[in-house]
Amino acid sequence: MKDIWLKGIQGALAAAAAMCILTTAYAQPAPPIDVVLQDLASPDRLTRAQGLSALLAQSGGEAGGGNARRVSVIQLLHAHPEQAERIKTALITALEKLGEEYEAAMRANQQLDESFGEYSMALTDAVAALQDPRAVKGLLSIGGIEGVADICPVAVDAIIERSHAPELFWQGVSLHTNAFAVRTLGLCLQRPAMMRAKPEVASKIRRELLAHLDSPDSTVRIVAAEVLSPLRADPEVQAKLQAVATADPHFGLDGATKDRVTFRVRETAAAALSPSDALSFYVTRTLDTRACRVQHASETLVAEPFIGPETRDMMKRTMCSHYDPTGQDPSLCWIVEPANACAP
């Protein structure tokens, strides 16, 4: 459930074959930035993928996933300050184009080729590194959940709008775009430094998540319950989760299927109220010393929660995909126990 949106993309697409497209350029002499940006603006998606690979190669880094690509983008902008604005604009525009192609293909029930998955992940990582408010539209369209969360205060209205938009389907199967948006709202709350600076935004997110507990979409209700868990000490949140755990009244299906869906919603709400230590924990930062620590979900929080409760596998993904180019972001706790959490 925690990967609904990514499964919607990656379940329909095979990404492996595109790796050669995104790594070949690293072995070739680097073309001029102008040429690379022209390729990145090509109407042909494979040409754009090659342009992205060539652009990242300009940083002097190596092909890689997640954080490696984010680092490459920051290095690239530092290496070419006179071209930095053009590079940012080209990357953001390319992601918006890819999002339009993806949505058009899904609405037409078209099967995208194998190159799409890897290119979409690489481009999303590159754009997320920019932490640019202009990237909100593209990141939302293609599932860049972490990238959107990193610019939450300015992105919240767009995320909320997406959470209420018509659902996107592929061959009759929901891609759960609304639930993806709801999960992104939850991730916004896991950026405490930003949320402290914008308490009115945090309040707006809280109101939206509570409202989504009444959604007729069971997947949206499940995700809303999950992401509200860090706020379970709030009396209104606690009461609402307890009500859902006791009697979820929204039945979208009939018979045995309805019973299974209802059980999952109730079970999720109950788990949000009392998360299990066996499955979840927080990463926290103390308010006085700013020291990071791991805290079990059952403990009374004695520090400011950063991420959680989460499974350890999901925690590692979240922690290790958040890149802070300044090294001074007070909300980051991704180098914590377990030791070497971000190692392959």
Image (tube, helix red, strand yellow):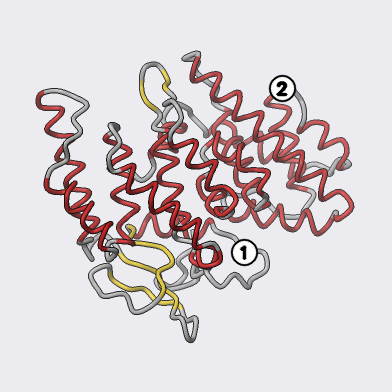
Determine whether the residue tagged by mark 1 lies in a helix, strand or loop. Answer: loop
In the picture shown, does residue 243 fall above or below 192?
Answer: above
Looking at the image, residue 153 sits to the left or right of residue 285; the answer is: right
Q: Which mark is residue 311?
A: none
Q: Are marks 1 and 2 in contact (CB under 8 Å)?
A: no
Q: Residues within 10 Å of mark 2 (few under 14, many from 20)?
A: few
Residue labelled with disc 1: 324
- Out of 8 and 35, give the one closest to the viewer: 8
* Amino acid found under the numbered disc labelled 1: Asp
Could you say where residue 276 lies in the image, as x and y percent from the top left?
A: 21, 62
Question: Where, by quadrant of the figure, is residue 119 drawn?
Answer: top right
Which mark's residue is nearer the viewer, 1 or 2? 1
Say which residue appears at 41% left-offset and 43% top-offset: 182
Asked if one can make out residue 343 in the rendered structure from this viewpoint, the answer is no
Question: Where, by quadrant of the figure, is residue 77 drawn?
Answer: bottom right
Say which residue appears at 43% left-offset and 33% top-offset: 164
Asked if one can make out residue 26 in the rendered structure from this viewpoint, the answer is yes
